[in-house]
Amino acid sequence: MTPSVRRSFVVAASLFTLAGAPLGAQGTPLASWNDGPTKRAIMTFVRATTDRSSAQYVAPDDRIATFDNDGTLWVEHPLYTQAAFALDRVGALAPQHPDWKTTEPFKSVLERDETAIAKFTEADWEKIVAATHSGMTVEAFNDLAADWLARATDKRFKRHYTELVYQPMLELLAYLRQNGYKTYIVTGGGQDFVRAFASRVYGVPREQVVGTASKTKFTIGESGKPELIKAPDILYVDDKTGKPEGIHLVIGRRPRAAFGNSDGDEEMLQWTQSGGGARLMLLVHHDDAQREYAYGPDTKVGTFSNELMDVATKGGWTVVSMKKDWRRIFPFDP
Amino acid sequence: MTPSVRRSFVVAASLFTLAGAPLGAQGTPLASWNDGPTKRAIMTFVRATTDRSSAQYVAPDDRIATFDNDGTLWVEHPLYTQAAFALDRVGALAPQHPDWKTTEPFKSVLERDETAIAKFTEADWEKIVAATHSGMTVEAFNDLAADWLARATDKRFKRHYTELVYQPMLELLAYLRQNGYKTYIVTGGGQDFVRAFASRVYGVPREQVVGTASKTKFTIGESGKPELIKAPDILYVDDKTGKPEGIHLVIGRRPRAAFGNSDGDEEMLQWTQSGGGARLMLLVHHDDAQREYAYGPDTKVGTFSNELMDVATKGGWTVVSMKKDWRRIFPFDP
């Protein structure tokens, strides 16, 4: 491929991404998945649950597929994208908070002390998220997140974060939807943050994003206009046991297929599997340091533990090897 | 109409109801609505927001319509149906709770003391709901509610509660859906209770029911199987300010049209209206003691206050007179 042809291709690919989720270059489903047991497991599941003559047929209303976001649909290393957003927001808000110069965890953020940031506890992050994700209307927050995503870039790939989505997973979302599945995102990340881009990037509408949610407060604003203000308090955390709980709250149905990449997804996949009948439980294993990252089982990095790999093996779950199963990683890959 | 023809008609009408929401006897939209300003307001709104050449055109993704349930879609008098369910559950569970014979509010329920029940405080009802709606899997609760609804009947009409739905509102739900609107129920009642019948009765799928939600707890049951158990604690109350908050949580979009009948719906309608552009805010006024009930403004019964009527008048909201605007009230009406 000449450089200019490649460039056109990249542009075309990103247009496809913007329009929802591409079928893949050839118009065939799952074109970026290499042939093998993983791709077969997906296609077998979809055929079994959508073929009316199959004993495992599932009525369209019950075709629910839930996807974790960070590390499952887009890159989560070296830092969750939402964390990068929150750190940038600390910088933007600092002039209004002179005390942050001397108060942790804000001090380390303002000093760009990456070693300190890497050691932040959950409580530190909660403080940062509470300070940067509240006190504004839900629309204002949506605009802030969307604007930031349109500007910010990842250090390694020099790409917008919304470009660092996995092409095979975009194809999987599209393939499931073409087969009557309703695709949901079920993320430990902020529900409102993910809503700011899920439709454009994944073709998943706002009402199909389940995530960690802060409380909101309905109030009549200064202008006399009703407003919904994001509060600093968390309503519920959509991670681990919170995933099946959040699924029940927002969807009210047990998924037929669930996709994740970490210990935080274990309960969602267990809950999915225990419904009986044909179910698809899939975990993405990041084992491709060259094209993306390698972490998880047998490394001391990330949150895909050896215990989770054991659970997956015993449960007959499908584990994706990014290295072996994915022909392309990103939409901009050749 | 001869009695036997009438009987066939009633059977046909209830079959339509079971299948979702009927178009009305003539196959024309809103057939059970009398001509007049109310029906015109609905049709004008729908045309303005769905006609591509209209300045008020709304893209399909943003066509969200939210409906209160009790008193808006089905009868709420003399007692909310869910309250009748909870009282029956107290009776069913009493053998396991010998202390209830001497402990209020359970004592009054077991003694069928209607005067005492009529005076129950919100705290009394919370105790009753906590005791009768928790400690079981979400599926078991769904079955309990569905089974009860299949058996229990209303005293005045001698009908199943799910037959006491308003035919004009079923037609309105259908009309909006035919015009690309996604119809949601947004109820102060229990989300899981309404999910048990919303699809069959209103054609509204489980994931489009927003309601007061209890917490659930994911746990591995005795058999080693993952279970979601309904907890006695409330996660959030979907009433008054809780309605726009619940809408943001589950839908993440501001409705274009909102339908209610009480003070508990005021904020939902305010929130809807303040989005600007063409919006439809509608309140059902129960002013038909003969065919249903008469309560609300200028009576001392019910929760449609004179203040709400003032807000509706000032805001240009549409107020339905059941007596004048509805040709039929129930699907079984002639």
Image (spheres, coloured by chain):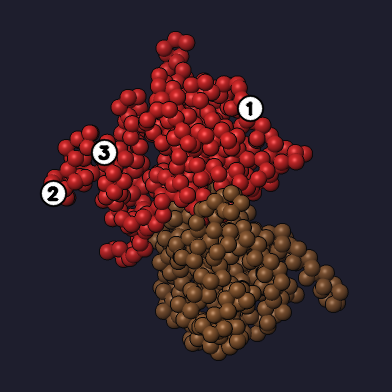
Chain colours: A brown, B red
Q: What residue is at 33 percent from the left and 49 percent from the top?
A: B141
Which residue corresponds to the image point at 78% horizontal and 70% vertical from the top-left? A10
The disc, 2 or 3, on the residue closer to the chain's N-terminal end is: 2
Mark 2 falls on what kind of element? helix
Depth order, front residue of B127/B98? B127
Q: Which of marks 2 and 3 is in front?
A: 3
The image position of residue B192, as x and y in percent, is 39, 48
Asked if badge 2 and badge 3 are on a common chain, one would say yes
Tell me which amino acid carries mark 1.
Arg
Residues tagged 1 and 3 counted as in contact (Cβ below 8 A): no
Q: Residue B40 carries which label?
A: 1
User: Image check: B320 left or right of B90?
Assistant: right
In the rendered structure, the answer to whether residue B100 lies left or right of residue B214 reads: left
Say if labels 2 and 1 share a chain. yes
In the displayed structure, A310 sits above or below B292; it is: below
Per the model, the C-alpha gap separating discs 1 and 3 is: 41 Å
Residue A330 appears in the rendering: no
Question: Residue A83, located in which quarter of the rendered image?
Answer: bottom right
Q: Name the residue under label 2.
A: B98
Say whether disc 1 or disc 3 marks the residue closer to the N-terminus: 1
Please tell me which residue is depicted at 53% across the width and 48% down the height of the picture.
A60
**Residue B181, numbered label:** none
Q: Mark 3 lies on which chain?
A: B
Residue beneath disc 3: B119
Residue A69 percent across, percent down from the top left: 56, 68
Camera-side residue of A312 and B106: B106
